[in-house]
Amino acid sequence: MSKTSQITSIEELEELYGPAVPRSLTKEQDHLTDHYRAFVDAAPFVVVATSGPEGLDCSPRGDPPGFVRVHDKYTVMMPDRRGNNRLDTLKNIVRDPRISLLFMIPGVGETLRINGKAEIDSDPDLCASFAMQGKKPKSVIVTKIESVYFQCQKALARSKLWAPESIVDRSTLPTAGQMAEAMSAEPFDGNAYDEGYPEHMKKTIY
């Protein structure tokens, strides 16, 4: 990339791309419409983007459809399920409440995006209301919506994400155990980790 081709201003961007398609602006709302709520209710998978002093974070979250609960048209709630305790997302929210959520539904080309401000609520009754398999999350991420809009099908169509012929044979990629063993400073049996993980996941998924 040469310095002469680098875009460094909004004016240069707008000159290169032209004006926004009008529908791309009118579809943005400050609340969940009935149509947008239908996407939230149907989505079993959400990508969560946050920002903090150490930088950006993008985290996958998944559960049965409806796991992101619509509290009202300006508020959604999401349980923070058991993980590895890195707490990247939560640490970011404590220091910078800005959050972005990308909702994805298997087989559906459109995605839904929510931008807003989040807080972490550890109220026992609220957490208990999100219990799965008798286990409740330690906290719930409560997002106050500032903007919400849908994204058209182009990205998923180009990627063929939901097409059966796009499914990748897992054996063609490194396993979690292999990757962990390669990066571990201490002795680590990657094969044993991989063999034991299915049973481990059953016990720790919630």
Image: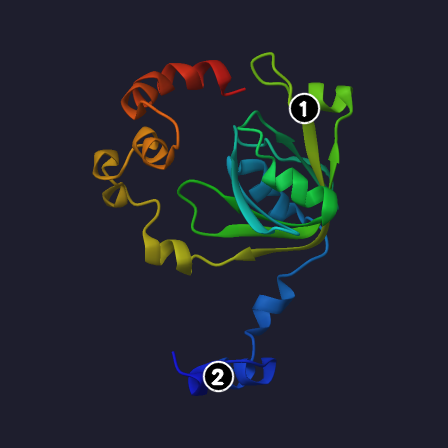
Disc 2 designates what residue? 16
Location of residue 206 with respect to 9 vertically, above or below = above
Q: Residue at x 61, y 50 (%)?
A: 54
Element type where label 1 sits in the image: loop
Could you classify mark 2 by the number of other residues whose Cα lies within 10 Å: few (under 14), some (14-19), or many (20 or more)?
Answer: few
Colouring scheme applied when the structure was drawn: rainbow
Task: Depth check: give the residue in front, 112 or 37.
Answer: 112
Q: Position of residue 15 (x, y in %)?
A: 53, 86
Instruction: State left or right for residue 44 relative to residue 122.
Output: left
Nearer to us of marks 2 and 1 is 1
Q: Earlier in the sequence, mark 2 or mark 1?
A: 2
- The answer to whether the residues at label 2 and label 1 have Cβ atoms under 8 Å apart is no
Q: Position of residue 173 (x, y in %)?
A: 25, 39
How many circles with numbers are drawn on the protein? 2
Q: Quadrant of the C terminus?
A: top right
Query: How far apart in space, not on screen, are marks 2 and 1 (Cα)?
Result: 47 Å
Residue 138: assigned label: 1
Q: Residue at x 41, y 60 (%)?
A: 154
Q: Position of residue 62 (x, y in %)?
A: 51, 33
Instruction: State left or right for residue 204 relative to residue 146.
Output: left
Element type where label 2 sits in the image: helix
- Mark yes or no: residue 197 visible: yes
Q: Amino acid at mark 2?
A: Leu
Task: Depth check: give the residue in front, 147 or 51.
Answer: 51
Q: Position of residue 92 (x, y in %)?
A: 66, 45
Q: Quadrant of residue 76?
A: top right
Q: Amino acid at mark 1?
A: Lys
Task: Depth check: give the residue in front, 53 or 61.
Answer: 53
Task: Depth check: give the residue in front, 29 or 15.
Answer: 15
